[in-house]
Image: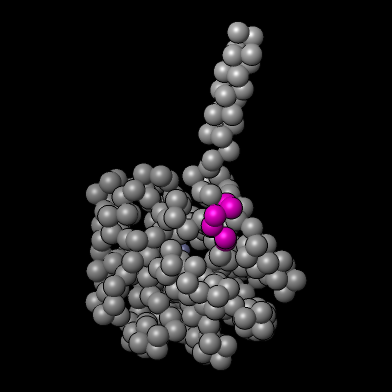
Amino acid sequence: MKHLKLAVVLLFAVVVLTLDASPACDVLAEPSVPVFMYHSISDVPVGKDEALSVKVKDFEQQLAYLKRMKYTGIFAEELPEAGKTHRPVVITFDDGYIDNYTTAFPLLKKYGLKATIFVVSDEIGKPGRMTGAQLKEMSDSGLVSIQSHTVSHQNLKNLTHDETEYQFSHSKAVIETVTKKPVRALAAPGGFWSKDLGEQASRYYDIAFRSFGWGTCKRENRFRVPRAGIFRSNTLAEFQAITRERSQTAIRTSDEANDRG
Ligand SMILES: [Zn+2]
């Protein structure tokens, strides 16, 4: 009887421990893929946040490192199938700065690395932002995927359900008209995100990205994929460390903190 009691207690403990140890994302089964978030590539800082402009030489050194280490760039929307690719890496840009076309695009071509640009549909063609023709040219090159960063870059947590619906559906429609290709991925403006927003986004998109986090699990977190922000102050050594870390270990983050985006 004593043994039976002990067995029941042990069984209970094993069940509880197992439940506790099985997060939504199986870190052992899913190797992590580095997902980088850039904004502007410019020696002269653009916009009000200097940190968002990575210097041209730094960006080129980062791409050269990825190329040297035999990484293969895949589009953001291809992340769920990343397992088919040798050493996949996802390079993303937010907001649609003009230097993505004038500066980053030629370097992506030089190093043969694919990238994804999340554009704000209402800002296409505005001063400092890329035009529809530039987006189409990049999309047609097969090297750049143009995806959605909503209609007007508002904090989605402040919007009604219907307003958010418009941000998701209208941006997708506008960008698809520009590129003549499907828009399947979304990046949350400013990193403001929640589980409910992820569920709402899933009606229009196959995958959604936040602006912060340490790794990515491809299946369970498909509507809240974290990215590693690369900023002006990041050294090449830091970039290399981030790349290695995310390539080898899927580190789960429950950090829902809002951040730059
Ligand atoms: Zn943004």
**In the displayed structure, does residue 19 sit left or right of residue 246?**
left
Q: Nearer the viewer, residue 148 or 34?
A: 34
**Left or right for 24, reference 123:** right
Taking the magenta stretch, the answer to whether it contains residue 31 is yes
Look at the image and give the residue range highlighted in magenta.
27-32
Residue 120, quarter of the rendered image:
bottom left
Q: Position of residue 258 (x, y in %)?
A: 53, 50
- Residue at 30%, 66% (x, y): give it: 171
Residue 45 seen in this snapshot = no
Q: Position of residue 135 (x, y in %)?
A: 37, 82
Q: Is residue 190 left or right of residue 174?
A: right
Q: Quadrant of the N terminus?
A: top right
Res 105 visible:
yes
Note whether 11 is above or below 113 in the view shown: above
Residue 95, x across and y down, in percent: 45, 69
* Image point (66%, 79%), residue name: 69
158 is higher (above) or lower (below) than 185: above
Q: Nearer the viewer, residue 69 or 228?
A: 69
